């Protein structure tokens, strides 16, 4: 039985690319569920993380950064973000403390949608750890005159500064209700999905220009081998994954001179995957060229980048 007064609700993180939505989600969940990178448009799917304590269960939804889509993948990303806004109790609009002290066009559009959906919005000013203090107040003032925010909270998703205040504010806004998920469930991401994302994170880290955005990872096989004397205990996992790219020249760059680049991607990803799985991992990577895959419905579907209702 739940205690009376227990609260629960859904909270969507929204904002332009690179403002730190996924970093904040990871901090809130205490796990590395969403990959992050200094390159914009890192997140492609809505990722769910469950925050749970004795007073409340909050389901956070990380979304792809809002941007002007240039292909079918971009359409999917923006549509998913919009949908996550429509289906939530509270919206966290993330901005960076270093922004110019005015409301950007993108933020205006997001706030228009929020008011259309009749949602409560908390303005989260992120990256205060690297901001000039004097710049934050004018930024707050500019936003305060644009929208009736439920709260405005400066945080650092990186250091965790202000995050407890944010959680306390959210608890005030969500309704009384039951736990939607068991206490120990913390995400909707499967090991296969997390594996693909961890590989993509290393591609983002180790490649440049148009390659990171034109790349996707498909897990082709995921085989678990268990200890002979303990069928519950995994000895290792064998994974084959394909890196899709758009051109044969890109394939060459991803493989690198004498295969060095793909070796680096593989060994860095393997370490992260082993940490996530809690056992050793044999990872085999290969590269496939799929021209214009970001506009091809069938491929997007296979990769999980196609809306159910499209
Ligand atoms: N200094 C500092 N850096 C941060 C903070 N939060 C995020 N970052 C960095 O900002 C970059 C982008 O962070 P992400 O969490 O990937 O941003 P995002 O909003 O999820 O980006 P998209 O998925 O592309 O929309 C990364 O390099 C993070 O390490 C913060 O509070 N302080
Ligand atoms: Mg992200």
Image: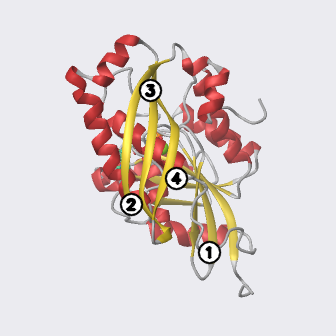
Q: Which mark is residue 191?
A: 4
Quarter holding residue 116: top right
Cβ–Cβ below 8 Å for labels 3 and 4?
A: no
Q: Nearer the viewer, mark 3 or mark 4?
A: 4
Give the mark, 1 or 3, whose residue is nearer the N terminus.
1
Instruction: Estimate the x, y position of residue 31 in percent, counting from the top left.
Output: 44, 62
Q: Please tell me how crowded label 4 is: few (under 14), some (14-19), or many (20+) other residues with Cα within 10 Å.
A: few
**Which element is circle 1 on?**
loop
Q: Residue at x 37, y 42 (%)?
A: 283
Q: Please tell me how crowded label 2 is: few (under 14), some (14-19), or many (20+) other residues with Cα within 10 Å.
A: few
**Left or right: 265 in relation to 107:** left
Q: Nearer the viewer, residue 306 or 126?
A: 306
Q: Which mark is residue 279?
A: 2
- Residue designated by label 3: 213
Q: Which mark is residue 183?
A: 1
Instruction: Estimate the x, y position of residue 76 in percent, counting from the top left.
Output: 64, 31
Mark 1 and mark 3: Cα distance apart in space: 36 Å
Within 8 Å: ligand 1 and the Cβ of disc 3? no
Q: Which mark is residue 3?
A: none
**Which element is circle 3 on?**
loop
Mark 4 and mark 1: Cα distance apart in space: 19 Å
Cβ–Cβ below 8 Å for labels 2 and 3?
A: no
For the N terminus, the image quarter is: bottom right
Q: Please tell me how crowded label 1 is: few (under 14), some (14-19), or many (20+) other residues with Cα within 10 Å.
A: few
**Which element is circle 2 on?**
loop
Within 8 Å: ligand 2 and the Cβ of disc 1? no
**Which element is circle 4 on?**
helix
Mark 3 and mark 4: Cα distance apart in space: 23 Å
């Amino acid at each position: 039985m739940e205690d009376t007064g227990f609260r629960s609700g859904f909270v969507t993180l929204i904002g332009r690319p690179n403002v730190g939505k996924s970093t904040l989600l990871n901090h809130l969940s205490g796990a590395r569920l969403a990959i992050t990178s200094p390159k914009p448009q890192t997140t492609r799917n809505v990722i769910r993380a469950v925050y749970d304590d004795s007073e409340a269960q909050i389901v956070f939804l990380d979304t792809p950064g809002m941007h002007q889509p240039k292909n079918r993948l971009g359409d999917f990303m923006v549509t998913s973000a919009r949908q996550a806004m429509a289906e939530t109790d509270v919206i966290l609009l993330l901005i960076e403390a270093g922004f110019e002290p005015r409301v950007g066009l993108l933020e205006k559009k997001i706030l228009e949608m929020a008011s259309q959906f009749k949602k409560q919005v908390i303005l989260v000013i992120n990256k205060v750890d690297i901001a000039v203090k004097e710049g934050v107040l004018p930024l707050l003032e500019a936003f305060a005159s644009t929208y009736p925010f439920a709260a405005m909270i400066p945080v650092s998703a990186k250091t965790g500064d202000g995050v407890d205040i944010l959680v306390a504010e959210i608890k005030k806004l969500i309704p009384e209700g039951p736990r939607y998920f068991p206490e120990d469930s913390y995400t909707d991401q499967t090991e296969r999905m997390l594996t693909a994302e961890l590989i993509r994170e290393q591609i983002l880290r180790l490649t440049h220009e148009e390659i990171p955005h034109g790349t996707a990872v498909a897990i082709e096989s995921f085989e678990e081998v268990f200890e002979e004397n303990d069928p519950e205990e995994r000895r290792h996992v064998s994974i084959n994954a394909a890196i899709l790219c758009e051109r044969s020249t890109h394939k060459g760059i991803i493989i690198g001179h004498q295969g060095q680049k793909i070796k680096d991607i593989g060994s860095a990803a393997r370490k992260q995957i082993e940490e996530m799985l809690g056992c050793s991992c044999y990872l085999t990577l290969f590269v496939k060229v799929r021209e214009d895959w970001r506009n091809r419905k069938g491929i997007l579907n296979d990769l999980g980048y196609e809306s159910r209702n499209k």
